Amino acid sequence: MRIKGHEPHYTHLAFYDGGLAPQGTPCVLVKGGARFGGYNPKTGKVAPFRNIVSSEARTEDYLDNLTAAVEAGLADPQTFFVDFFADYVEVVAFASRVRALTGWVNERHYHALRQVLCGGEEDCATYAAIANRVHERYEELTLKASRRGRQKA
């Protein structure tokens, strides 16, 4: 018996669908950009995510938004957390939301997060692994920055 091989398909980002999520509801990050931060494709700028805990945006909206910014070339692995998160509380809130996701990791999310988190394949294979890598990478960069600060003093 023969089976047809896998045919890769370009995954849709709700972020680009005129600000509409798959269910047809407005994407909170697009319509509330000033309040919640994120990537603005019209200006080509990123404002750090904030109010993640109180936001009614879906976790997928955050991942799509982040992915769009990475694909636009606006993410530097060395400044990722400063560029995308207002503070450590937002990093933890983002990681908690990501950890709660189940199912397959969207391949565009996988490639974007792997690029900014400098991880191996296993670091971005599941949403739980992504959440773990977010914490690890934040700690790595924080430690590196504190060492630099001590060297300057």
Image (tube, grey):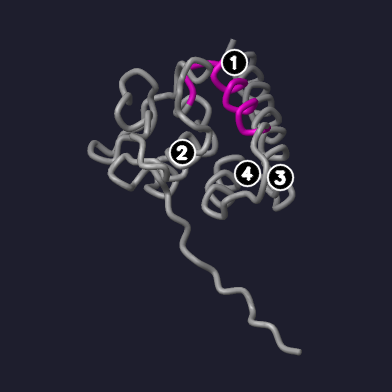
Magenta region, main secondary structure: helix
Residue 93 lies within the magenta run: yes
Q: Quadrant of residue 18?
A: top left
N-term-proximal mark, 4 vs 2: 2
Say which residue appears at 36% left-offset and 36% top-offset.
25
Which dot marks residue 118? 4
Mark 3 neighbour density, 10 Å: few (under 14) some (14–19) many (20 or more): many
Amino acid type, residue under disc 3 in the picture: Asp
Circles 4 and 2: CB atoms closer than 8 Å: no
The residue that disc 1 covers is 149
Mark 1 neighbour density, 10 Å: few (under 14) some (14–19) many (20 or more): few
Q: Nearer the viewer, residue 113 or 7?
A: 7
Residue 8 lies within the magenta run: no
Say which residue appears at 51% left-offset and 38% top-offset.
60
The residue that disc 3 covers is 123
Amino acid type, residue under disc 1 in the picture: Gly
Which dot marks residue 91? none
Mark 2 neighbour density, 10 Å: few (under 14) some (14–19) many (20 or more): many
The residue that disc 2 covers is 66
Q: Nearer the viewer, residue 113 or 9?
A: 9
Read off the magenta span. 85-99
> Residue 54: horizontal and vertical position, in percent?
49, 15
Circles 1 and 2: CB atoms closer than 8 Å: no
Separation of marks 4 and 2 at Cα, in angstroms: 15 Å
Q: Nearer the viewer, residue 89 or 21?
A: 21
Amino acid type, residue under disc 2 in the picture: Leu
Say which residue appears at 23% left-offset and 39% top-offset.
42
